[in-house]
Image (cartoon, coloured by chain):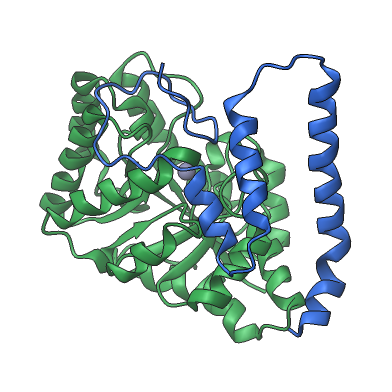
Amino acid sequence: MAYIDPHIHMVSRTTDDYQRMAQAGCVAITEPAFWAGFDRSSAQGFFDYFRQLTDTEPERAANYGIKHHCWLCINPKEAEDVGFAREVISIIPDFIDCKNVLGIGEIGLNKNSKNELIILEEQLALAERLNQLVLVHTPHLEDKLKGTILIMDAIENSSLDPSRVLIDHVEEHTVHAVLDRGFWAGMTLYPDSKCTPQRAADIIEMHGTERLWINSAGDWGPSDPLAVPKCCLELASRGHSKSLINTISYDNPLSFLSQSGKFSVE
Amino acid sequence: MTKKEIVDQYFLEHRAKLLDIAAFLDRIDRSGETDADFRIKALMRCIKELESEKEGRTERILGILSDQTTEPIDHAGMKGACGVVPPTS
Ligand SMILES: [Zn+2]
């Protein structure tokens, strides 16, 4: 069954992963800009990373029939140094018109610090100014609940339309508020943190499929690039219809991402 | 799914996860160190929550493990998270 993985960091994955994803039915992906496991020493490092996201990865993906798209930003883990973060933000407009760039992301908070919040607000303002979709990273583990609320408050203080913002990495304690406040919500399928395929299926059963998607967020840490089809299998094993599975793994990402005017699966 | 179908499909998997937790606690005991670890203390609070007969255990456990303050902190310090709110020193 064809599916879209709307959040995966292919710069950290091998070509074999592209092949396995294609074999499992992946037709399109989106890759948010994120932390590479180490702090870049200069804004130039981000210039090169944005070239990788806009030039190199689309070509690697195309070899396996997968359409590659990306999001640009300074991620919250490297946003504590406000001066450095602003230098990176100043590069983004040079890349925003590239044909595979869908918007600003994954912006958000990591430790819920004042400086992270300043840079989040500045990137929300950039998204407003450039009329871009926004993909939001919410903090890990004990920091998620507080960070998700701070992020939603910051977005509501901007003029961004919540239906053009997806708040990712929701779990049982945050999904309700995110959907209630009109945002899209993403569930990330991770082995040790965030949601397992089973818990994601539970959340779908409790909240329905409206404005909700699933993603693998596969990266350089413990993660699984085939997590989306595994969650689809979990839903099928519980007797859910092909149409529900298609909604969560294909139609919903297609609806949200198509608002960019640049997303395509062909 | 019916209750029986759910139990049939998932019981053995969760029985194994329960044994993993028990073995983990036994392993800690065998270390011979008796000082309390804030993470294990939080885990034991969460385990008590499992005995609740009210639906919503997952959300309540995530609540126990979450920072319930509302103001941004002054500086990020470390990048990682440990899964439980660390004690303030
Ligand atoms: Zn990510």
Instruction: From the viewer's perspective, tell me whether residue B36 is left or right of residue A105.
Output: right
Rendering quarter of residue A73: top left
Going 45% across and 43% down the picture, which residue do you hit? B66
Going 35% across and 63% down the picture, which residue do you hit? A177
Of A241 and A207, which appears nearest the observer? A207
Question: How many marks can you see?
Answer: 0
Is residue B73 at least partly visible in the picture? yes
Q: Is residue B63 above or below residue B88?
A: below
Of A121 and A34, which appears nearest the observer? A121
Residue A33, given in percent of the width and then of the height, sits at: 40, 39
Q: Is residue B80 above or below residue B23?
A: above
Residue B23, given in percent of the width and then of the height, sits at: 86, 36
Q: Quadrant of the N terminus of chain A?
A: bottom right
Is residue A257 at least partly visible in the picture? no
- Which color is chain A depicted in? green
Going 82% across and 73% down the picture, which residue do you hit? B7
Residue A105, given in percent of the width and then of the height, sits at: 34, 46
Of A182 and B88, which appears nearest the observer? B88
Residue B28, given in percent of the width and then of the height, sits at: 79, 24
> Which chain wears blue?
B
Instruction: From the viewer's perspective, tell me whether residue B11 is left or right of residue B50.
Output: right
Rendering quarter of residue A110: top left
